[in-house]
Image (cartoon, rainbow, N blue to C red):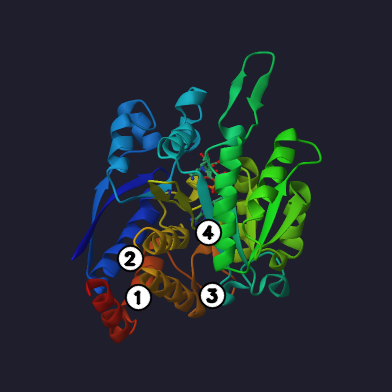
Amino acid sequence: MKSYHLTLLPGDGIGPEIMDAAIKVLDLVGQQFNVQFDYEEALFGGCSIDRNGVPLTDETIEQCRKSDAVVMGAVGGPIWDTQPHENKPEQGLLKLRASLGLYANLRPATIYNALLDASSLKPTAIKNADIMVVRELTGGIYFGTPRGMDKGKGWNTLSYTKEEVERIARTAFDLAQKRNNHVTSVHKANVLESSQFWREIVEEVHQDYSDVVLDEMYVDNAAMQLVRDPKQFDVILTQNLFGDILSDISAMITGSLGMLPSASLGEEYAVYEPVHGTAPEIAGQNKANPLAMIGSIAMMLDYTFGMPEAATMIYDAIGEVLEMGSRTEDIATPNTNVVSTTEMRNLVLERCEGKSKTIIEMVRMSYEG
Ligand code: NAD
Ligand code: IPM
Ligand code: MN
């Protein structure tokens, strides 16, 4: 039997609630496909500050490095906002990404037909939209130096090296080849030198991908186009800060931030994390939508463990639960049945259990074969 070791970083706020849901789904997949997943949990974010004084310890980084993959909830919350800037939970997240070399953040916005009415956008505008935001994750203004603040001003630096742009551009073009062969590189080259540089390098890399169409768009226009006509996009390739913003916008195409999963990938390590944060105002109330976290588990099964059938089973199960009309509060509409985090978890588990035993048996034999 194949066996994999995972580090779990539930984090703060709704993090532990959605992690519970996701791991129960992963346990079931393990049983169905005869793969063993074992878990080691670690403190990360505000809860780690409370216990260890810092948001991310060196031991936790080491533990992540020794794992086959890392599953993360979310970090941060108002009670830690008074921490010195460099000790905030969010800085711990940046340290985790940098320490593990997670330069490529894949944030897919997939529309479930059952949720066409959950979005604030028109159903005709979003039906069949399918966008993958490829966000550079270890460079740009999040990491540039000098940075700082004093009484008179605050400052940050936005810079990119050729290597940093090249490798994320390759990630985007490679993904586009498996999707609809279209990359939109989003930048602000009309104002920023770093973006002019970005544009040049992306064009250079594009020469190796003649089958992929490359478009460009300024980020202000891209934000508007995303809500005007999201179907025009396939892969959006962009820098760290723009990707943070554009992925939250693209979440509304799916109906909620609670629907958006993500994979943060590097040469050696991978972290799977929902796009959303700790949603402090609903934390501890069993209200959070666990589907972004469960979707991140599906991405892990596909990308890290080579189990695309298991990933598809999860996506299909989610689609069926939504078709049945059960929704957490964030995606609810007047005619739907509002369910809690644990009820949504149980519904997804039931749908996974109901999947054809024959298909699972065939896939299982091919893994063991
Ligand atoms: P947020 O993503 O936590 O919440 C934004 C809105 O979306 C809120 O209305 C929230 O209730 C809702 N929402 C988010 N996830 C949801 C879910 N799964 N189910 C239902 N509703 C959901 O963003 P915020 O309020 O700007 O930030 C709150 C805290 O989270 C801050 O401390 C922030 O720094 C942190 N944060 C962490 C991460 C991360 O760890 N990756 C990401 C974003 C924000
Ligand atoms: C995200 C979050 C993080 C980011 C914060 C919490 C550091 O917003 O993962 O989108 O800006 O990258
Ligand atoms: Mn964000």
Q: Which of the marked residues, 1 or 2, is nearer the chain's N terminus?
A: 2
Residue for point 62% across, 56% down: 208
Amino acid carrying mark 4 in the image: Leu
Instruction: Count how many numbered circles sit on residues in the image.
Output: 4
Instruction: Point out the frontmost of discs 3 and 1.
Output: 1
Residue for point 61% across, 53% down: 247
**As rendered, which of 332 and 354 lies closer to the eye?**
354
Q: Which of the marked residues, 4 or 3, is nearer the chain's N terminus?
A: 4
State the residue position of label 4. 260
**Residues at circles 1 and 2 in contact by the CB criterion of under 8 Å:** yes
- Label 4's element? loop
**As rendered, which of 46 and 149 lies closer to the eye?**
149
**As rendered, which of 212 and 13 lies closer to the eye?**
212
**As rendered, which of 19 and 205 lies closer to the eye?**
205
Residue 33 x, y percent position in the rendering: 26, 72
State left or right for residue 60 relative to residue 34. Answer: right
Callout 1 environment at 10 Å: few (<14), some (14 to 19), or many (20+)? Answer: many
Amino acid carrying mark 3 in the image: Thr
Say if disc 1 is inside 8 Å of ligand 1.
no
